[in-house]
């Protein structure tokens, strides 16, 4: 007999219209496989936070269905909620409570006995480098620490699905990288992760699959690899050793001079870059370094959102 | 969630609520004690000695049950209204809303937290009142029954106020403009027999009058109104408020978008 594996998240025809008439979601369908690291991207106001709010039952849906590991959030709300851990965008813990109390209380709301709750609180506070701050009033923690505290709180009941709404917003680069490593580790241990982010580099380096949401509709839902394959053209920034007065000309490579020693070139995916280097060397120009002008995913994201906007305006 | 898990969730909320008002004891426990001691000194000792008897009791004995009840009412109400609204304001109520804790457990947890403060302050005020007046307890079941029900009812009312509140002003309007006048006009300081027929009848629409009189009856054995009617009123109001509070939580009014 063929065994079916329930998706970690199955969203069907999900709609949300707020009391003021704003239609935040216009019938979205989304499936996230168990063990996936999934990115939900979209511009501000696209419907990302509304979707997450509905999954964790902070927002009431207008219609449609949401299932977490096969459990309907309306009919089996208790089981569905046991499966989900959520890290919201805004700080939403009692600023006067200590991190250890916040975690142990949260475990209590999931029916976890105090002894186990203290063990887990110690484990996650240590993993997220907050153990030394366990008895400090949480209002005195830095922004990065508060964000890590919310991650620890979301994990205290060991959910199978972790939903993070812009977890690294306002976090410095070093801390962001360490959070990425932690999330990768959690995912490798079997937790399905859904992430919304504005840092497309974050989505590219962490996630395997992606959905792009815009104006309450899913405009793309595919794997990151497939999406990046759609990229036809990339823009590179070249740093050259000596300043040049005018932009060098190389046939087939549209170059622009942005500063005396910085060149930009747009290259098609099928085009070799070796010819450019050869031509520049012949002109006595030595390239010191090369990098992408923007994140590759950012270019695609921008294209898709622009395309969606054009389609809307064309009716 | 099985019953054991529900019990853990409930006891977590209650423990957190008790811990909250104990942590901020200079705001929650000291002011009501000072206020009530001043009432005892001024109305009991200084003015009371000149008033003489009220309903055939020394004035301090007449007024003490009302003052105890006043502290139970205001502390039960203010604990829940400020704690629940504070959780809404800081958004940490979401910790509970995303959890599998059923709404009726959330409701009971907050209400028992409020009752703990109301009854705790009431017990301290009762101990203090022994310094100012002599009591012989007339009926323990009536005293305990009415004080528990009153505390329950005002904790529920505090929660409903907090659900509707959208600013800190909203959580002080009801205590200031509704609760305080009802308490002062609820027979704490006088017998409604003194009011005459018309104002005596008007007083009968004040629910606090029934609670204060039932409590006074339990303590000293005198009352202006029927005790069975008092219990009926308080039970009826508690059931109605419980139903309303649960309905609001189920609907997610002012809590979920």
Image: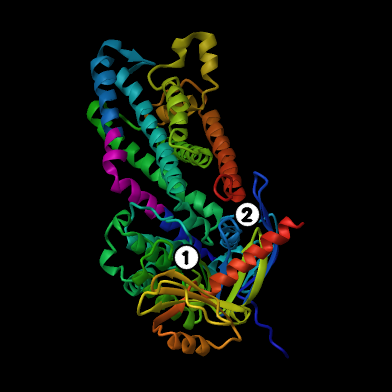
Q: Is residue B234 left or right of residue A218?
A: left
The residue identified by callout 1 is: A111
Residue B216, percent from left and from top: 40, 27
- Of the pair A97 and B218, the residue shown nearer to us: A97
Q: Which secondary structure, mark 1?
A: loop
- Of the pair B229 and A114, the residue shown nearer to us: A114
Residue at left offset 60%, top offset 43% = B243
Q: Chain under label 1?
A: A
Work out whether B12 lies above or below B55: below
- Of the pair A300 and B145, the residue shown nearer to us: A300
In contact (CB < 8 Å): disc 1 and disc 2:
no
Mark number displayed over residue A77 = none
- Of the pair B149 and A210, the residue shown nearer to us: A210
Residue A192 seen by the camera: no
The residue identified by callout 2 is: A60
Work out whether A87 lies above or below B242: below
Badge 2 crowding class, 10 Å Cα cut-off, few under 14, some 14 to 19, many 20 or more, is some
* Callout count: 2
CA gap, disc 1 to disc 2? 24 Å
Q: Which stretch did the figure color magenta?
A: B14-31
**Residue B45 in magenta stretch:** no
Q: To which quarter of the image does residue B57 belong? A: top left
Q: Is residue A56 left or right of residue A3?
A: left
Q: To which quarter of the image does residue B172 belong? A: top left
Q: Chain under label 2?
A: A
């Amino acid at each position: 007999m063929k065994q079916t594996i329930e998706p970690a998240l199955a969203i069907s025809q999900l709609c949300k219209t707020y009391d003021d008439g704003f239609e935040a979601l216009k019938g979205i369908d989304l499936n996230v496989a168990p063990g996936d690291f999934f990115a939900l991207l979209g511009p501000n106001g696209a419907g990302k936070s509304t979707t997450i709010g509905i999954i964790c039952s902070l927002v009431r849906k207008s219609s449609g269905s949401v299932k977490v590991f096969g459990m309907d959030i309306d009919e089996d709300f208790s089981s569905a909620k046991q499966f989900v851990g959520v890290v919201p965008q805004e700080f939403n813990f009692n600023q006067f409570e200590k991190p250890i109390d916040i975690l142990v209380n949260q475990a209590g709301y999931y029916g976890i006995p105090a002894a186990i709750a203290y063990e887990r609180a110690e484990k996650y506070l240590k993993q997220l480098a907050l153990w030394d701050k366990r008895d400090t009033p949480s209002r005195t923690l830095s922004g990065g620490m508060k964000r890590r505290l919310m991650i620890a709180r979301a994990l205290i009941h060991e959910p199978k699905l972790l939903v993070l709404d812009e977890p690294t917003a306002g976090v410095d680069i070093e801390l962001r990288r360490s959070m990425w490593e932690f999330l990768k580790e959690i995912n490798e241990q079997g937790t399905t992760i859904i992430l919304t982010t504005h840092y497309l580099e974050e989505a590219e380096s962490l996630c395997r699959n992606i959905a792009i949401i815009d104006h309450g509709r899913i405009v793309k839902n595919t794997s990151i690899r497939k999406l990046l394959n759609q990229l036809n053209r990339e823009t590179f920034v070249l740093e050259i050793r000596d300043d040049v007065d005018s932009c060098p000309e190389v046939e087939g490579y549209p170059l622009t001079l942005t500063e005396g020693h910085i060149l930009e070139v747009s290259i098609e995916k099928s085009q070799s870059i070796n010819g450019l280097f050869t031509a520049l060397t012949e002109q006595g120009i030595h390239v010191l370094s090369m990098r992408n002008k923007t994140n590759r995913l950012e270019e695609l994201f921008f294209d898709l959102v622009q395309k969606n906007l054009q389609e809307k305006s064309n009716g | 969630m099985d019953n054991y898990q529900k019990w853990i969730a409930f006891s977590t909320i209650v423990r957190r609520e008790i811990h909250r008002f104990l942590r901020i004891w200079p705001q929650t426990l000291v002011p009501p004690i000072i206020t009530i001691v001043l009432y005892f000194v001024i109305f009991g000792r200084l003015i009371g000695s000149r008033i003489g008897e009220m309903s055939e009791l020394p004035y301090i004995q007449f007024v003490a049950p009302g003052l105890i009840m006043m502290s139970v009412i205001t502390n039960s109400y203010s604990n829940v209204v400020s704690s629940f609204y504070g959780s809404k304001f800081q958004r940490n109520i979401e910790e509970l809303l995303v959890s599998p804790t059923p709404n009726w457990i959330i409701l009971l947890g907050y209400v028992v937290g409020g009752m703990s403060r109301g009854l705790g302050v009431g017990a301290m005020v009762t101990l203090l009142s022994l310094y100012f007046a002599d009591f012989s307890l007339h009926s323990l079941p009536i005293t305990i029954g009415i004080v528990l029900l009153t505390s329950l009812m005002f904790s529920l009312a505090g929660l409903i106020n907090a659900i509707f509140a959208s600013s800190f002003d909203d959580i002080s309007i009801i205590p200031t403009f509704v609760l305080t006048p009802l308490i002062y006009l609820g027979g704490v300081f006088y017998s409604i027999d003194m009011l005459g027929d018309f104002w005596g009848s008007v007083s009968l629409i004040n629910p606090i009058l029934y609670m204060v009189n039932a409590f006074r009856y339990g303590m000293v054995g005198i009352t202006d109104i029927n005790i069975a009617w008092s219990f009926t009123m308080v039970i009826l109001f508690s059931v109605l408020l419980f139903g309303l509070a649960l309905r609001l939580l189920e609907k997610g009014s002012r809590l979920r978008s």
